[in-house]
Amino acid sequence: MSDPTLLVLASLSDGAKHGYAMMEDIERFAGLRLGPGTLYGAITRLEEHGWIKPVAAEERRQPYTLTASGREYLKTQLDALDRLLKTATRRLKHA
């Protein structure tokens, strides 16, 4: 999976994070390093959709958190990926 939108949402699914923490978390769980332009472009799009929102910062870095609609969107996308994975795995066994 390399969609920055889903990667950011997945990163935020266990709590608020600022950009650098998201980059580190995504690298750990997905093995991908998002560049700053890619990450902050995704953050901007997600915020415009209302799927994430900024939260109060204690330092200069701005943390973000999932909104209820962001959590629902992520769940819908993960369900679709799960169906894809199950179908491909089943078909691969017969190939």
Image: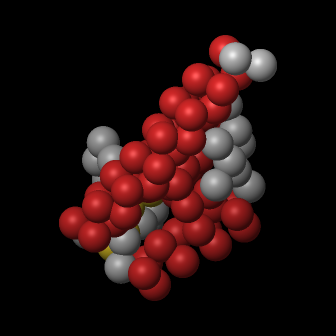
**Given the current orientation, which residue lies at the most extreme top position?**
93
Q: Is residue 67 visible?
A: no
Image position of 91 with respect to 24: above or below: above
Between residues 94 and 75, which one lies in front from this camera angle? 94
Q: Nearer the viewer, residue 62 or 88?
A: 88
28 vs 54, left or right, is right
Judge left or right: residue 77 versus residue 20: left
- Is residue 74 something that shows in the picture? yes
| Residue at 54%, 50% in the rendered image | 7
Q: Position of residue 18 (x, y in %)?
A: 44, 56
Residue found at the far bottom of this picture: 48
Q: Residue at x 64, y 32 (%)?
A: 88
Q: Quadrant of residue 57?
A: bottom left
> Left or right: 17 with respect to 22?
left
Which of the 4 image quarters holds residue 63? bottom left
Protein image colouring? secondary structure
- Residue at x 72%, y 67% (from the top left corner): 37
Q: Quadrant of residue 50?
A: bottom left
Q: Position of residue 89 (x, y in %)?
A: 61, 24
| Residue 79 x %, y % | 40, 46
Placement of the C terminus among the 4 image quadrants:
top right
Residue furthest to the left in view is: 68
Is 29 above or below relative to 45?
A: above
Where residue 36 sits: x, y (%)? 69, 60
Q: Residue furthest front?
A: 94
Relative to 64, residue 47 above or below: below
Name the quadrant of the N terminus. Answer: top right
Q: How many marks?
A: 0
Measuring 70% from the left and 17% from the top, which residue is drawn there? 94
